[in-house]
């Protein structure tokens, strides 16, 4: 069986790169060897991930002080992609190119990540609903952990999306909001599964840092407020930790690691004594490595990260500005992973079962 995976893969985002790696690895570990990532790189994605980080900060052409480290990060992410993800031979930038070159699969899986998100940045990209596959090829379609992210309604795209999803053998989504949209607005059956990063372990690729001091790891994609920075410094002081920031420069960090590839990124999470993040995959890897952590929700990602924490009864890990004072013991109570880990393992096992059954059978 020849399997293609369509997802966000050509990216400088650690979570996006690792979810692609994890889904492909999980499928290969189950015994399907002829699996590849469909090398679809729409121009809007390339601009968002590779061009925007290198541009001037504003229209006045203020110098981007992170230009060179961002460039090194882009190169390191690209190397990880080429070294670890088998890509299809033909690179596609447009849907017409997908139609021309990608009709030779027995099964195409779309997902995971927020490939179905509809907003001003991403728009409605019908290719991620697999409309480029000709009906006469016999190719089956399914999704795994696909997400609409914070899209609240399909609106004018509802009929088109519902019609496209009707051709799927199985619809597996990542979060409760996506489940609602498929079930209620498309009137189709769907199952909620875990992000593919939960499906594998990372011992084979993790590169542990050579930091000798215990550290608090910061991982953020949007900046922290002054109050949030104060909270991070307080946690570090109370626990006797230095602060390391990964992914971007933070002024409160003793060490800033911007250009790390995903292997080093995993290593820093693995070795951290405490983690503060405002990202979905930062939260996942904190849980996978059984770390003490705090999540600072931002408006763009509150739905998916809040939904994730709720699934494992970890809502108390969300930072609350209203409850925080420097003198409080706020969020310093350790997570009891003897209660959390069985839930993680069960959800991963159930999700693998859904994925593998869907791959094996036309009636999944």
Image (tube, grey):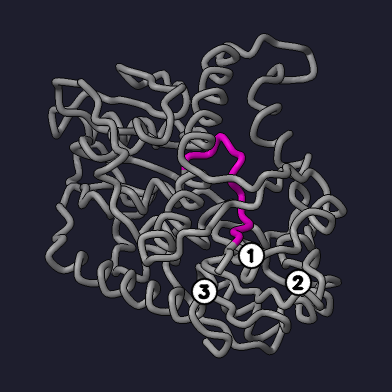
Q: Earlier in the sequence, mark 1 or mark 2?
A: 1
Residue at (46, 22) in percent of width and height: 259
The percent coordinates of residue 353 (x first, y second) are: 38, 78
Q: Secondary structure at mark 1?
A: loop
Q: How far apart are the alpha carbons under marks 1 and 2?
A: 9 Å
Q: In terms of image quadrants, where is residue 103?
A: bottom right
Q: Secondary structure at mark 3?
A: helix
The percent coordinates of residue 11 (x first, y second) are: 59, 38
Q: Are marks 1 and 2 in contact (CB under 8 Å)?
A: yes
Q: Earlier in the sequence, mark 2 or mark 3?
A: 2
Residue nearest the observer in this picture, 27 or 211 = 27
Disc 2 crowd rating (10 Å Cα; few below 14, some 14-19, many 20+) is some
Q: How far apart are the alpha carbons under marks 2 and 3?
A: 15 Å
Dominant secondary structure (helix, strand or loop) of the stretch shown in magenta: loop
Magenta region, residue range: 4-14
Q: Is residue 21 above or below residue 185?
A: above
Q: How far apart are the alpha carbons under marks 3 and 1?
A: 10 Å
Q: Which residue is mark 3?
A: 176
Q: Earlier in the sequence, mark 3 or mark 1?
A: 1
Q: Which residue is mark 1?
A: 148
Q: Which residue is mark 2?
A: 154
Q: Secondary structure at mark 2?
A: loop
Disc 3 crowd rating (10 Å Cα; few below 14, some 14-19, many 20+) is some
Residue at (76, 45) in percent of width and height: 92
Left or right position of 301 against 313:
right
């Amino acid at each position: 069986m020849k399997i293609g995976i369509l997802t966000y893969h050509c990216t400088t985002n650690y979570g996006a790169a690792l979810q692609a790696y994890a889904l492909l690895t999980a499928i290969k570990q189950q015994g399907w060897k002829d699996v590849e990532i469909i090398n679809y790189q729409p121009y809007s994605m390339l601009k968002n991930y590779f061009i925007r980080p290198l541009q001037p900060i504003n229209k006045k052409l203020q110098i981007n002080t992170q230009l060179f480290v961002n460039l090194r990060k882009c190169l390191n992410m690209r190397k990880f992609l080429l070294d670890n993800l088998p890509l299809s031979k033909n690179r596609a930038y447009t849907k017409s190119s997908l139609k021309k070159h990608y009709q030779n699969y027995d099964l195409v899986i779309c997902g995971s990540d927020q490939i179905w998100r509809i907003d001003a940045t991403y728009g409605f990209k019908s290719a991620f609903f697999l409309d480029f596959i000709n009906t006469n090829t016999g190719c089956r379609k399914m999704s795994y952990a696909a997400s609409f992210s914070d899209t609240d309604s399909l609106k004018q795209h509802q009929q088109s999306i519902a019609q496209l999803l009707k051709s799927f053998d199985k619809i597996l989504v990542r979060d409760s909001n996506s489940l609602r949209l498929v079930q209620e607005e498309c009137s189709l059956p769907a199952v909620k599964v875990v992000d593919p990063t939960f499906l594998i372990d990372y011992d084979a690729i993790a590169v542990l840092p050579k930091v000798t001091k215990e550290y608090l790891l910061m991982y953020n994609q949007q900046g922290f407020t002054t109050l949030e920075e104060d909270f991070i410094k307080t946690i570090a002081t109370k626990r006797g930790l230095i602060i390391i920031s990964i992914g971007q420069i933070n002024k409160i960090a003793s060490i800033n690691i911007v250009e790390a590839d995903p292997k080093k990124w995993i290593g820093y999470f693995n070795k951290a004594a405490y983690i503060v993040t405002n990202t979905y995959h930062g939260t996942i890897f904190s849980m996978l490595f059984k770390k003490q952590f705090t999540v600072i929700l931002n408006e763009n990602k509150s739905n998916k990260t809040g939904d994730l924490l709720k699934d494992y009864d970890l809502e108390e890990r969300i930072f609350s500005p209203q409850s925080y004072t420097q003198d409080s013991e706020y969020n310093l109570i350790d997570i009891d992973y003897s209660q959390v880990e069985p839930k993680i393992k069960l959800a991963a096992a159930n999700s693998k079962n859904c994925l593998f059954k869907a791959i094996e059978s036309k009636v999944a």
